[in-house]
Image: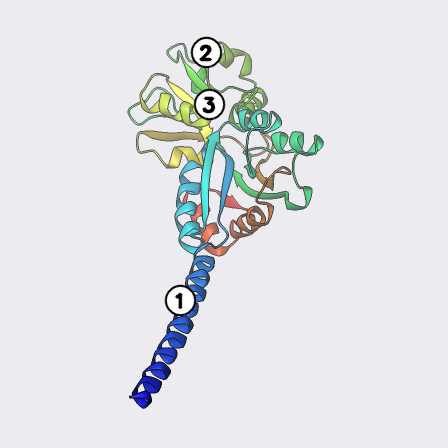
Amino acid sequence: MRWILKVLAVVLIAVLLVGCRTSGNDIVETISGQLSSQEVKATLVISAAASLKDAMEDIKQIYTEENPNVTLTYNFGSSGSLQQQIEQGAPADIFLSAATKQMNALKEKGLILEETHKDLLENKVVLITSTGNSQVIGFESLSDVLVKKIALGEPNSVPAGQYAEEVLNNLNVKEVILPKAVYAKDVREVLAWVETENVDAGMVYETDAKISDKVKIVATAPEGSHKPIIYPVAVIKDSKNTDVAKTFIEFLSTEKVKSIFEKYGFNVI
């Protein structure tokens, strides 16, 4: 009887030891699993010119597939409005402007990381009408009395509007055209007004005209009639995700992203 009790005692102790060891392993494995699932995650807020919307949406798709722990949040608008938002402390990790003027303004105020500042893209200014319009055939047509409204970006905040006025001035038609001008909050609004025939013509970037089947390009601004249209990019100094933001800017220069920009008509620098 004693012999049986001793055997039972040994078996019981062995079972308890194995149970403790298994439980300990389970705890370790559970903690390890929790740590592996809690990988570093980040949300990048990217303030980008409205003319980049379609290209950036395509870029977002391939970037998030490769970087599932990074969420891209876009804020599209006129470069001038985005500049003001950043100056006023609005959250932003990256600024992608449609002109150097706005980026340089932030640079002068120490609001960007200068080592991340680079020129990324080039664009062109074009004159567009709705596809059914036969009245406007070029810049010279804009002075015609039958042309009542011409849409431009608001020049104080919309780079496309600034470039448009440069073109009109250098073609010596600015004084005749400006009384007919109606001003939009960004270049995409100009495009929408032309598409819906609320205006007779509009001046937009070539890339904007190419995304619509409701408008046609009737003229391209002559070379030298405006400053080069450069799209610079930089990381905002107050970004809480500086390293991830820098990596995203590097991603914008990869071959796969270059092909997306080129698809939408941008010239990659």
Question: Residue 46's x, y, as percent?
Answer: 51, 38
**Residues under numbered marks 2 and 1 in contact, where contact means CB atoms less than 8 Å apart:** no
What residue sits right under mark 1 in the picture? 26
Q: Nearer the viewer, residue 260 or 110?
A: 110
SS of the residue under disc 3: helix
Q: Nearer the viewer, mark 2 or mark 1?
A: 1
Q: CA distance from mark 3 to mark 1?
A: 76 Å
For residue 139, which numbered disc appears in the image?
A: 3
Q: Earlier in the sequence, mark 3 or mark 2?
A: 3
What residue sits right under mark 2 in the picture? 180
Question: Residue 81's x, y, as percent?
Answer: 54, 24
Is residue 174 left or right of 140 when viewed as pictured?
right
**Residues under numbered marks 3 and 1 in contact, where contact means CB atoms less than 8 Å apart:** no
Q: Is residue 74 above or below residue 250?
A: above
Q: Residue reaching furthest bottom?
A: 3
Residue placed at 51% from the left, 30% from the top? 221
Question: Residue 244's x, y, as percent?
Answer: 55, 49
